[in-house]
Amino acid sequence: MEVAIQQSKTNNSTTVKIINLILGILFLLSAVAQYNDPDPWAWMALYGFVAVVLIFAALGKRNKWVPIAGIAVCVIWIATLLPEFINWLQMGMPNIAGSMKTEEPHIEYTREFLGLAFCITALAFNWRRAR
């Protein structure tokens, strides 16, 4: 029975490492894709930071304080976008993916809000595993 439990934990650990590596690469690609954003450096830095945390976690190097620092930055940042996100919800959630151009302000704000939500989720997951 103990062998089966240990094998399950090993398989789970390997799966989590693979997921962290894949997500880390996706966040890294997202950081690179920000070069044409109106505020590219902030997003490149944030997505790059999350990518590094995820890739280090995939390599077995975790620190519980690094994700907390990232979460704190994201929570403050997302709080500044919350009124615009609520506005988008009240508008009936119009399409934000129809065009890469942001003709309406709610499109950019909502995309940024959701990007920060993804960052918080990834960092919180890794913080929880590092505890």
Image: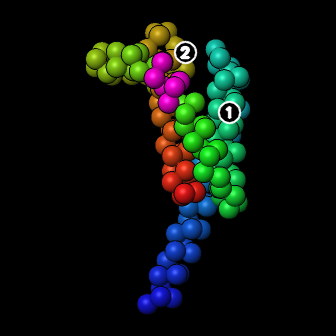
Q: Which mark is in front, 2 or 1?
A: 1
Q: Is residue 45 above or below residue 8?
A: above
- Callout 2 secondary element: loop
Prevailing SS of the magenta stretch: helix
Give the image location of residue 121, x and y in percent: 49, 43
Q: Report the quarter where the N terminus lies.
A: bottom left
Q: Which residue is mark 1?
A: 31
Q: Which residues are magenta?
A: 75-80
> Looking at the picture, how far across and down is residue 111, in whole percent?
49, 25
Q: Judge the density around disc 2: few (<14), some (14-19), many (≥20) Cα neighbours within 10 Å.
A: few
- Nearest the viewer among 98 and 3 is 3
Q: On the image, numbered disc 2 is attached to which residue?
A: 101
How far apart are the alpha carbons under marks 2 and 1? Answer: 18 Å
* Up/down of 88 relative to 119, above or below: above
Q: Is-magenta flag for residue 76?
A: yes
Picture quarter with the C terminus: bottom right
* Amino acid, disc 1: Ala
- Is tag 2's residue or tag 1's residue first in the polypeptide sequence? 1
Q: Is residue 29 visible?
A: no
User: Residue 100: which quarter of the image?
Assistant: top right
Q: How many marks?
A: 2
Q: Which residue appears at 64% of the width and 26% of the height?
A: 43
Q: Residue at x 52, y 69 (%)?
A: 12
Q: Amino acid at mark 2?
A: Lys
Who's the residue at 63% across and 41% down the image? Answer: 50
- Residue 49 in the image: state x and y as whole percent: 68, 38
Indicate whether 125 appears above or below 74: below
